[in-house]
Image: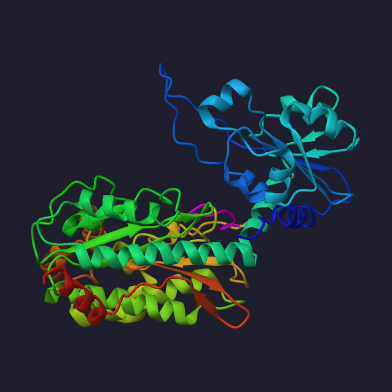
Amino acid sequence: MQVYPAKQHFAKTAKNLNVPSGVIFVRGGETIIHPDSDTEYEFHQDSNFYYLSGVREPGFAAAYDIASDTAILFVNHVSADEAVWIGVPPSLDAYRVAHGFDQAHYTFDIENVLSALKPSTVYTLEYTNTEQLGASLAPAVDHRALIEPLHEARVFKDAFEIDVMRRANRISSDAHVTLMKETRQGMNEAEVRGRFVGLVLAQNSMYEAYGSIAARGRNAAVLHYTKNNQQLDSSEDMILVDAGATFENYASDITRTWPVGPTFSPLCRDIYQIVLDMQKQVIQACGPKKQWEDMHNLANRVAAQGLLKLGILRGPLDAILDNYVVGYFMPHGIGHLIGIDTHDVGGYPSGTQRVNKPGLRYLRARREMLPNMVFTVEPGLYFVDDMLNDAKNIKEVAQYIDFDKVAEYRCVGGVRIEDNIVITETGYDNLTVCPKEVDELESIRAVAYK
């Protein structure tokens, strides 16, 4: 793996900050202990700090002198006594080289090193503890100006970031295919989730990018279902698996839905094919200078057309779209930015407002797509009882829904299909390499029952 581009990330952030001088200062996370215990919580690095340092360990800090283009890493000092328990750490110079910094010092030298730079302003984050800067630098601290330039830097991925996200997607895609080959009626959702975790950890992923979802049948109507403890007791059901690995602290976010039995039931196939059509048309439409919100609206149009053909919806297509009827079947947005965080920063630039309409109100990004942004594309259709009961009481919506037909398809629960794409100069690059066509899935599922 190449050297982490910490200095380049600092320089990119400083360019967005648009000031000629000053120091950017950030601190990483600290180890947290369970209350009344000596057991540590699993450590996950602060995402903003990781972006600017590439350091996954607790107790570090980093700084960047804007005028001299100098990146400085502050390393957590490990005493000889601590080293007995956690091992002897690399040298200062080894840390400096591995993470692409110009200088490396221990954290107890923060005040001395940064004071010598005589910065007029120290730009940091609102939540950053600045005690180690000392009294001399306290008046120079600005907690407000950094966050938006830093978030905007994180929105646009460089070649290093895209490479590691491609690797995360490959690890996750391979794990999904293995699950498709192994999942059988009678297993438990917990076995499916556990198998995914084991597969990705074995490929040098440090942890899941988020809490994995393994939802069979009606459980798939819960968008963020995390119980993962029910039996796969019907071959007529599908199982929705929303699971992604991290690699080098960058996330993947992949969802596949496949039959519990060897083939899709007719009702499940109907809904699955609509969602697949939604995703394929949206991905094909993605490219630079297009609005992300328009991709959501395209998904709604394709969904409405499919649901009309099934008789679940009725009436004029434009009227269905104008009344946001599809939002009662796809209550979430079409996708989100992804990077170090699964739901990555920068989706709503300053001044951008949410649209308070069904489906759109949960859109996680409203902005123009530009090269080197990475988005998930994750359409879905769900039969959520409470939402559809609400729809019955809204005349403008209820007139376009055949609720008897809805009852027929209720057993499907929900379908979601999710890939991760990079916006390029000419279109998109799909990082996800996992089968999703009906015939592909049924061919793979046949392996599970041989």
Q: Position of residue 416 (x, y in %)?
A: 31, 65
Magenta stretch: give its range: 341-348
In the rendered image of this protein, does residue 412 appear above or below residue 19?
below
* Residue that appears at 62% across and 23% down: 80
Q: Is residue 346 magenta?
A: yes
Most extreme residue toward the top, as rendered? 36
Q: Is residue 335 visible?
A: no
* Residue that appears at 56% across and 81% down: 427
Quarter occupied by the N terminus: bottom right
Q: Position of residue 200 (x, y in %)?
A: 38, 56
Q: Is residue 215 visible?
A: yes
* Residue that appears at 89% across and 49% down: 67
Predominant SS along the magenta part? loop
Quarter occupied by the C terminus: bottom left
Could you tell me how many numbered marks the image carries?
Answer: 0
Q: Position of residue 162 (x, y in %)?
A: 57, 66
Q: Is residue 443 left or right of residue 135?
A: left
Q: Is residue 320 left or right of residue 167?
A: left
